[in-house]
Amino acid sequence: MSCPAGSHNTAEANAKTEPLPTTTTAATTTTGVDSSSSAGAKIRDAAALSPEAYEAEHVHSVYESIAGHFSSTRYKPWPFVASFLRERVAPGSVGLDVGCGNGKYLGVRGGGGGGGGDNNSNSTSTNNSSSNNTSSRSSSSDVHLIGSDRSPALVGIARGRGFEVAVADGLALPFRRACADFALCIAVVHHLSTRARRVDALRALLECVRVDGGQVLVYVWALEQGASSRRGWDATSEQDQLVPWVMKANQNKKAKQQQGDSSSGGGGGGVVGGEEDPAGPSADTTYERFYHLYREGELEDDMRAAGGRVIESGYERDNWWVIGGHAETP
């Protein structure tokens, strides 16, 4: 069964269920910070001029450039997402993974290529895109899960692993209304630079799942991160941030080779069109990715603003998550 193109287990101890006290609105200013001159305000002002252009520069082009290296660091599913797929999704269900990246969640229930399950949970390898490609291509799955991502490079990696993936923008999904039983959207919505666009993304997810019981699971980076977080953010930090991704010279070379392998079946590695890339792997490169860091309660507010209801929500490793569904009809 497919989702054609067109225009239970108890949760973790810190999970919350409705009704959920709202501790903040979706405003992006921070108490005690001069929003007129803060770095966050400057980011918001720049994004407001043209959100699409800002995200093209600070999200889409970045992931195209770092796809191979990024993929090599994304091989272990978040525990709660994996448990949702394994324990809460019924056999025979049809699901979507919007912003699927390299497809690490597409194989949690079997099927497709390697790298989706927990077989790499103790791995420190920096190249999972090739060594695991053949390990589970022929494995069967009792759930039909389709992925989509805005990055053609990441889609190429996921397809190389045997998954069914489309290049698609999260604000213009190509799936029929109510075609799916569930949808995932992990670490995606926080890359949208205005609240209106973040709410629209949640609304687009809700439109894809069936009205009678369809669910969406969404993860976003949290503003309130624990003391163990290397980023050091807390409730007094700016919510809108440009987060650096540094690729060392040798990582540049590996990333180019991985992207070449995924798109053309081999080659790559600092060579473009048969010639040495003049900007090639001789220097470190820093890319800046836009993130909106969500306050506690803000993701729930956005889900409701999108016309949904909050079924459950919680916190896992510096991320807020919510399971939402269609609002109940009075």
Image (cartoon, helix red, strand yellow):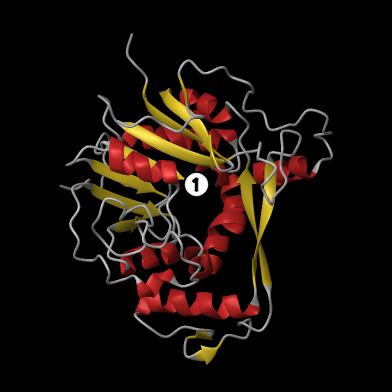
Spot occupied by residue 146 in the image (x, y as percentages of width and height):
28, 51
At 63% across and 50% down in the image, what residue appears? Answer: 290
Spot occupied by residue 172 in the image (x, y as percentages of width and height):
40, 45
At 66% across and 84% down in the image, what residue appears? Answer: 282
**31 is higher (above) or lower (below) than 156:** above
Spot occupied by residue 91 in the image (x, y as percentages of width and height):
18, 41
Q: What amino acid type is highlighted by mark number 1?
A: Val
* Towards the viewer: 162 or 204: 162
Spot occupied by residue 262 in the image (x, y as percentages of width and height):
38, 74
All told, the count of numbered labels is 1
**61 is higher (above) or lower (below) than 148:** below
**219 is higher (above) or lower (below) than 289:** above
Residue at far bottom of view? 275
In this orientation, does residue 81 appear? yes
Residue 153 occupies quadrant: bottom left
Residue at far top of view? 330
Left or right: 127 in relation to 156: right
* Towards the viewer: 5 or 40: 40
Location of the C terminus by quadrant is top left
Residue 10 occupies quadrant: top left
Left or right: 165 in relation to 90: right
Crowd band around label 1 with a 10 angstrom C-alpha radius: few (<14), some (14–19), many (20+): many
For label 1, the residue is 188
